[in-house]
Image (cartoon, rainbow, N blue to C red):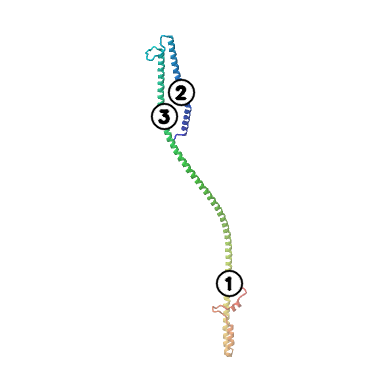
Amino acid sequence: MAEPAWQENLRLRLVERNAKESAYAPIIEQYRRLAQQTKLLKERNASLLRAMGTARANPSSSTVFVPGTADDNNPVRAAYITSLESQISSLRDELATVYKTQGQNAQRLLAMTETLREKEELSRMESENLRKARDEIVSLRRRVDQHNEIMSEKDRTAQILHDEINTLQLELGQIEERNQTLTKDNAKLLQRWLDAKQAEVNKMNEANDFYEDMQSRRQAVMNWRTGSTAGEEGGDARSSQGSGSGNGSGNGEANRNSEPTTTKDGTPSHTEKDLNLTPNG
């Protein structure tokens, strides 16, 4: 699991501070060793000077070291041995310090190696997460572009539909106006048709009344003619008995001329109709 950002910043600042503070650590260590060696040399020189002073004060003692001799009373040799022993002790201490430092460095190296391995693993995980995040970003950007294209297409479609709706509303308004006009025209035409039919009905009624009147008149004329014909036939019969057959042809013509001219269905002929029609008929 990744550390919080503030802890990582704090760690980086501490590492930077330690790097700055330990930048001159080797030089300081060299100066420390040089100072320690200088101190040892000064102490040895001081011992040698004391030994030389003792030798000058006691001329009987030998000041020259001869190998193989076992003179322990030689001050120069004693001072030299003391100096060497102190130097050996110092070198041993320094070697122990170096071993200790080396052990500490080894421990630190192991710790740093483990830390480096953990950091490498963390870096690998972070790299993998970064790669996944980049892939997700690319996918999300692609999806955003697709959504933008879809929204643009929807906006264009909505604009087209809005224009079509406006056009259809205008056409609907025109159609409604036309329907109102046609409704008014239909109402006028219906009223005119009803008026015309009413006039036709009135004319038919008048014609029927006129026809009934003419039928009644014709019936009266027929009745009158029938009565007149019967009277004339009676008189002719009486006259024929007295005058003989010579007058028969003339009476026959008179009878033929006086007979009503009718058609087969009992209606008067065109001549009679023309005589009986009024100017309105």
Give the answer, above or below, for where 62 lies relative to 220.
above
Query: Looking at the image, do the residues carrying marks 2 and 1 touch, with CB atoms under 8 Å apart?
Result: no
In which quadrant of the rendered image does the C terminus lie? bottom right
Residue 61 x, y percent position in the rendering: 40, 10
Q: Which residue is mark 2?
A: 30
Mark before the other along the chain sequence, 2 or 1: 2
Cα gap from disc 2 to disc 1, whole angstroms: 152 Å
Q: Secondary structure at mark 2?
A: helix
| Mark 2 residue crowding within 10 angstroms, few (<14) / some (14–19) / many (20+) | few
Q: Nearer the viewer, mark 1 or mark 3?
A: 3
Residue 95 placement: quadrant: top left
Q: Contact (CB < 8 A) between labels 1 and 3? A: no
Of badges 3 and 2, nearer the viewer stands 2
Q: Nearer the viewer, residue 170 or 26?
A: 26
Q: Amino acid at mark 2?
A: Gln
Q: Residue at x 48, y 42 (%)?
A: 138
- Residue identified by numbered label 3: 109
Nearest-to-viewer mark from 2 and 1? 2
